[in-house]
Image (tube, rainbow, N blue to C red):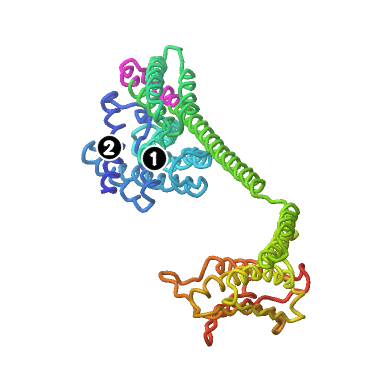
């Protein structure tokens, strides 16, 4: 279906200038100047850009249309169609290779490549067809270079005027910036139709008045105010105005002046289209940059707000350790000497908080300090569970000075107590061991009971997952946490490289 639509559009574009020329000048013009523009070039380039170069054989369908409907000679039609095929392939190669064309002409690079293609690619057909027409006597050799100039500009200007328009129309809503400003756009286009009509009416009358420069402000304003897609519509309005005024003034257009006037119109249209497309692309890039900058500024502002909230939360929840310790000591002092258990709990709590809150802000700590913090925690838990909790701590002397990530042991112990009581019958036994094996530090927390089966999950609790993530981040494959069940014991074992100093812990 796409190939059929492409063939219909290309064939119609081939027929249009012939039909117009036969209607306006039945006897023909010098150097075939009735080809003001060659719309097939714009249609063919747009078709290959949108559909792919494999569709290039479709362009030869114009031969059938020219021969059957217009009675054109087969040979010249084949020569022209082959030139159009090569022209479209070369133009697409330039636009895609050098312009990095992806979906539209919203950036300067594809637009500049399009401008280059509009000057280079038409040379193929601009030389071949006029050469054949001179050969078969359609016009004289002295008219050859005028024909080449008209042909080249007819194809190049049509490429600039139509290819971006067709691409924008096919892209749909993504290409347009006019939404929300439809009334303004219609007013400006209406004013532009009147201005372009007046301009080219005077141009084709050839009475010495030339208001062509008046068209530029309209196109530039659309390019700046709206976008590339709307600019292509403005250029199509210019093209339509040219044909409209040419049709009105053809009877009074002097034949000997026609080629020069048409050449001026072609050159003017090329410069106008090039200027409008470049300005529109620059404005589009600027708007994109401003949008990205605004997005980045909003993101930075959001990050700043989050950081500020984090600081406020830190201040809100921050507790002065010394005040807390003094308060606990004062509380302990108020307790009677006979309240032995409450006094021990307050002492253990004070020791636990001192070992956690009063630690230096560092990522690493020594095993002895980590074990001391855990022992304060366990002292409170033993008061809570009494004889139902039995704890055994065994730390090898050579392991006490080893450096490990802070709070590495605490989640293991908490996990063992929380799940151990739900899975053990009677008292819970807890063992904490640390030692060296083959230059590795081995820390083990074991509890009686069995491993919990996690329904729908293949991983243990969040605390253990955090340990694994921290070990992976700090040591990679050199460290690991494993859980095993053996003889009624659940053992969580951490293996990591032995570090005698904080700087050696990551090596």
User: Looking at the rendering, which quadrant does residue 88 occupy?
Assistant: top left
Rendered residue at 74%/78% (across/down)? 399
State whether residue 235 is above or below residue 356.
above
Camera-nearest residue between 18 and 337: 337
Distance Cα–Cα, label 2 vs label 1: 18 Å
Camera-nearest residue between 387 and 192: 387
Earlier sequence position, callout 2 versus callout 1: 2
Image quarter of the C terminus:
bottom right
Camera-nearest residue between 196 and 151: 196
Rendered residue at 30%/47% (across/down)? 60
Residue denoted by label 1: 167
Rendered residue at 24%/41% (across/down)? 67
Q: Magenta stretch? A: 245-265
Q: Secondary structure at mark 1?
A: helix
State whether residue 369 is above or below residue 165.
below
State whether residue 285 is above or below residue 322.
above
Residue 147 can be seen, yes or no: no
- Mark 2 or 1, which is nearer the eye? 1
User: Looking at the rendering, which quadrant does residue 361 occupy?
Assistant: bottom right
Answer yes or no: do the residues labelled 2 and 1 have beta carbons within 8 Å?
no
Please provide percent x and percent y for residue 463.
56, 66
Please provide percent x and percent y for residue 96.
47, 48
User: Looking at the rendering, which quadrant does residue 432 occupy?
Assistant: bottom right
Residue denoted by label 2: 12
* 264 is within the stretch colored magenta: yes
- Dot 1, how many residues are within 10 Å of its Cα: few (below 14), some (14-19), or many (20+)? many
Residue furthest to the bottom in view is 487
Give left or right: position of 298 versus 143.
right
Please provide percent x and percent y for residue 384.
59, 69
Q: Secondary structure at mark 2?
A: helix
């Amino acid at each position: 279906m796409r190939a059929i639509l492409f063939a219909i559009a290309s064939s119609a574009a081939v027929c249009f200038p012939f039909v117009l020329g036969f209607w306006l000048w039945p006897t023909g013009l010098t150097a075939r100047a009735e080809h003001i523009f060659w719309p097939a070039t714009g249609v063919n380039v747009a078709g290959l850009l949108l559909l792919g170069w494999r569709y290039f054989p479709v362009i030869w369908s114009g031969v059938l249309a020219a021969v059957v409907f217009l009675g054109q000679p087969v040979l010249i039609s084949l020569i022209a169609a082959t030139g159009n095929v090569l022209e479209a392939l070369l133009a697409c190669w330039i636009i895609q290779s050098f312009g990095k064309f992806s979906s539209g002409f919203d950036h300067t690079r594809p637009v500049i490549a399009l401008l280059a293609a509009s000057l280079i690619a038409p040379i193929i057909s601009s030389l071949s067809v006029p050469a054949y027409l001179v050969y078969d006597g359609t016009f004289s050799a002295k008219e050859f270079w005028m024909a080449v100039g008209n042909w080249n500009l007819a194809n190049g200007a049509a490429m600039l005027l139509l290819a971006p328009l067709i691409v924008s129309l096919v892209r749909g809503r993504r290409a347009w910036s006019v939404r929300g400003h439809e009334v303004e756009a219609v007013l400006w286009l209406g004013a532009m139709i009147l201005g372009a009509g007046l301009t080219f009416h005077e141009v084709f009358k050839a009475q010495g008045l030339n208001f062509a420069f008046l068209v530029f402000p309209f196109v530039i304003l659309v390019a700046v105010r709206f976008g590339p897609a709307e600019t292509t519509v403005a250029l199509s309005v210019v093209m339509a105005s040219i044909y409209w005024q040419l049709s009105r003034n053809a009877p009074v257009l002097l034949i000997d002046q026609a080629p020069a006037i048409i050449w001026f119109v072609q050159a003017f249209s090329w410069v106008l289209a090039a200027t409008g497309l470049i300005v529109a692309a620059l404005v589009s890039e600027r708007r994109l940059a401003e949008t990205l900058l605004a997005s980045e500024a909003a993101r930075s502002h959001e990050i700043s707000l989050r950081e500020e909230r984090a600081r406020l939360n830190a201040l809100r929840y921050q507790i002065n350790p010394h005040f807390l310790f003094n308060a606990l000591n004062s509380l302990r002092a108020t307790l009677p000497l006979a309240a032995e258990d409450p006094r021990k709990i307050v002492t253990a709590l004070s020791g636990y908080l001192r070992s956690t809150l009063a630690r230096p802000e560092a990522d690493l700590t020594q095993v002895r300090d980590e074990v001391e913090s855990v022992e304060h925690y366990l002292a409170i838990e033993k008061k809570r569970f009494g004889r139902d909790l039995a704890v055994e701590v065994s730390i090898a002397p050579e392991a006490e000075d080893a450096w490990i990530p802070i709070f590495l042991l605490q989640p293991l112990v908490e996990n063992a107590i929380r799940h151990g009581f739900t899975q053990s019958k009677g008292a819970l036994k807890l063992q904490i061991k640390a030692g060296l094996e083959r230059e590795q530090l081995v820390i083990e927390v074991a509890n009686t009971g069995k491993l919990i089966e996690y329904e729908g999950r293949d991983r243990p609790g969040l605390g253990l997952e955090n340990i694994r993530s921290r070990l992976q981040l700090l040591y990679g494959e050199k460290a690991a946490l494993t859980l095993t069940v053996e003889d009624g014991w659940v053992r969580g074992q951490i293996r990591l490289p032995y570090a005698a100093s904080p700087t050696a812990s990551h090596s």
